[in-house]
Image (spheres, grey):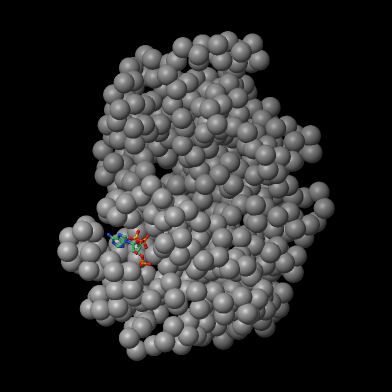
Amino acid sequence: MGAFKDAHGGGALRDLYLDAAGAEAAKAEARDLRSWDLTERQVCDVEMLLNGAFSPLQGFLNQGDYERVVKEMRLESGVVWPMPITLDVSAPFGEATQVGETLALRDREGVLLALLTVESKWQPDKEAEAGGVFGKADEAHPTVRYLYRQAGPVYLGGTLRGVEAPMHYDFKHLRDTPKELRARFQKLGWRRVIAFQTRNPMHRAHQELTYRAAKAAEANLLIHPVVGMTKPGDIDHYTRVRCYEKLVKAYPEQTTQLSLLPLAMRMGGPREAVWHGIIRKNYGCTHIIVGRDHAGPGNDSRGQPFFGPYEAQELFKKYEDEIEISMVPFHQLVYSQDRAQYVQTDEVSQGETVLNLSGTELRRRLAEGLDIPEWFSFPEVVAELRKTHPPRHSQGFTVFFTGLSGSGKSTIANALMVKLMELGGRPVTLLDGDLVRKNLSSELGFSKEHRNLNIERIGYVASEITKNRGIALCAPIAPYAATRAKVREAIERYGGFIEVHVATPVEVCEQRDRKGLYAKARAGIIKEFTGISDPYEAPENPEIRIDTGELSPDLAAHRVLVKLEAMGFIR
Ligand code: PPS
């Protein structure tokens, strides 16, 4: 362990790993210690702390440092540090923890990563943190949401002793610690290195921009994408890294390196840009590209952007000298059809025809299997994207029927299943209410809690089926809107979700009473019976609403098919 001087110029790098003997001793010590199981974000933070990427930090922030970072972007020592790196824990764990105690920090599999000597413990003012770091305490910001909904109420600060780096099984050849990257740059004779930060796939505009920035700075280029945690909904890092591997081939040989950064981003815009600068300096870079809306979180709950498009550049400028890494600011690039090349938006002449393809438009074209022009991206990159983002007719989907008992859900679902099997192409699984209750949820009753659990299980199975590009047909009552919304959210990550409200009125269901349950419910023999003695929250915006009083099962199933066709899921 200990600080070692950067062999390559720049600041001191703090490597917090113990040597082999120290690590063995720490493992023995840990046997008598209480353990904290790190969250996914905390594992990322621990990795960056231990390998020196977060130098000069030597552990999770203590209260004094934390408060000054939130208010002034500085540690108590006065050193610039823009992001609170804190260890949040649950209330009971926090209560049981003593200042002065040593804790064993473990990953999800129980592997000991580090020992933490607790030097401070406090309950943070989360509103002040959100306002100070992100400008406003608005839950439309993903990290504010995380802070309020996922982060524990107690923070622990203290120094770390590193035992083992978190294990990564993927892309090992592209993962480097700051020490390793600095050594590589030195070996290659790279004296000036410009870093490019990204959490998105890179296309021609990014390749042009980075190439020009490197040329302007007379530097070599490090493509340094984040593969820890990015903004929810981003393209997964496996796909992105395969795209980057294709893209690096577009640079002149020996000019560019690709390395992966296990950072958990905070989408902190201007503050995050400064933080990214410090991190890249620690990895041995001399320059960093800061473009339009760097690490932007999108819009707030009023539809306004959290930060101005060039606010990050302005803040970076203020701290550039202090953090000892130079910014290469960049405006957005657009494709000029007239000049057949990319130009900065501030260099476009009047009347010039420029082309741009937004992320939303790219996703639409992928989903519909449409052309993605060569001026926009490289064919090899597009091919990679198409593998994980197939057109809708090859994606999986779930048709989720909801409605009262006896409304006709199962009958329509069965008819739809047969019609889909007739069409062929994808496996179809029917998760009927009764079937699920027999096979998956046999121990559950009909309380709100049990019903929700039942629907969550159905949702989980359907999301797995959808992910694997199959078709799931679900037909439970699913009386609660919030649970249905949760299921929708989980499934739409992987494919289509079509909610079908079988809106047969309760009087009709009761009149039919095929299973005699309504009579029993009226007599009080069956308790908590949906529509009689238990609530049913009708969907407000289902993709389809069907009243079986007016439509035969055959026609109802046909309506669903037509809808699926219109949405592009079948053809
Ligand atoms: S839920 O609310 O979505 O978990 O319900 P589900 O799993 O679809 O199960 C509904 C079937 O169970 C029978 N049943 C009852 N339904 C509603 N309320 C009560 N109390 C109840 N007790 C038993 C009923 O036959 C439902 O079947 P379907 O196919 O919907 O008629």
Is 369 placed above or below 71 here? below
The spot of residue 384 in percent (x, y) is 70, 62
Position of residue 27 in the picture relative to residue 438 (left or right): right
The spot of residue 20 in percent (x, y) is 66, 15
Position of residue 160 in the picture relative to residue 383 (left or right): left
Position of residue 245 in the picture relative to residue 389 (left or right): right
Position of residue 379 in the picture relative to residue 81 (left or right): right
Assign the C terminus to one quadrant of the image.
bottom right
Is 504 placed above or below 377 here? below
Picture residue at 42% right of the left edge, 51% below the top: 441
In this view, the residue in front, 340 or 34, is 34
Tally of marks: 0
Q: Quadrant of residue 208?
A: bottom right
- Looking at the image, can residue 377 be seen? yes
* Quarter of the image where ligand 1 sits: bottom left
Q: Point out the residue furthest to the left here.
A: 523
In this view, the residue in front, 490 or 237, is 490
Picture residue at 28% right of the left edge, 66% below the top: 517
The spot of residue 43 in percent (x, y) is 51, 35
Picture residue at 52% right of the left edge, 82% below the top: 561
